[in-house]
Amino acid sequence: MPLKLSVSKGERFIVNGVAIRNAGDSAELIFENQAQILRQKDILTAETATTPAARAYLALQCAYLFPDKSAHYLSQFKEFLDDFLEAAPSAQTIADEIMENLRADKLYQGLKACSRLIGHENEVLAHVV
């Protein structure tokens, strides 16, 4: 099933590990086969992954984008997730959902669930300050 992606002027996205930026006006792209795609709003960089949940997300993002190195990144992700759960056990339900997706080899869905981990972390930290 093809995926239609609308890209705004200047928007960045990643396809199969390749960073791409739309240099022209808005564009519509159709991907006719399977590809690992992330839009700018879903991409974290090493510089922006400054919290425990963000580091877990970044490791999972790398596992999704670079399948040939996924074992390494999934191992990193699991360590970050375990550390996060030790500090914030209230995130266990989200972690269970992420792990269920990973066991089913649904990395993209796991990544989407992992973004909720960052939201949960923000909520927890808001109560600390």
Image (cartoon, rainbow, N blue to C red):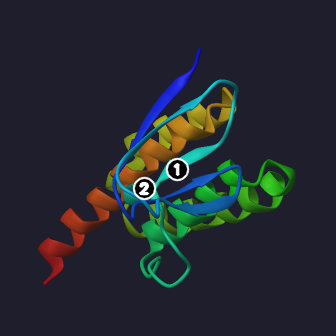
Q: Residue furthest front?
A: 24
Q: Which three-letter amino acid code belongs to the residue tagged 1?
A: Leu
Q: Residue 42 in the image: state x and y as whole percent.
A: 42, 55
User: Which of the two residues, 25 or 49, is positioned nearer the viewer here?
Assistant: 25
Q: Secondary structure at mark 1?
A: strand
Q: Residue at x 62, y 31 (%)?
A: 106
At label 1, counting other C-alpha atoms closer than 10 Å, the crowd grade (few under 14, some 14-19, many 20 or more) is some
Q: Residue at x 75, y 59 (%)?
A: 75
Quadrant, the N terminus: top right
Q: Is residue 23 above or below residue 35?
A: below
Q: Which three-letter amino acid code belongs to the residue tagged 2?
A: Asp
Mark 2 in CB contact with mark 1 (< 8 angstroms): yes
User: Which of the two residues, 22 or 101, is positioned nearer the viewer here?
Assistant: 22
Q: Secondary structure at mark 2?
A: helix
Q: Residue at x 35, y 55 (%)?
A: 25
Q: Which residue is mark 2?
A: 42
User: Which of the two residues, 39 or 21, is positioned nearer the viewer here?
Assistant: 21
Q: Give the CA distance from mark 2 to mark 1.
A: 6 Å
- Decide if residue 59 is on the left or right side of residue 44: right
- Decide if residue 83 is on the left or right side of residue 78: left
Q: Residue 120 in the image: state x and y as whole percent.
A: 28, 57
Q: Is residue 67 above or below residue 85?
A: above
Q: Which residue is mark 1?
A: 38
Q: Residue at x 56, y 65 (%)?
A: 58
User: Which of the two residues, 128 or 10, is positioned nearer the viewer here?
Assistant: 10
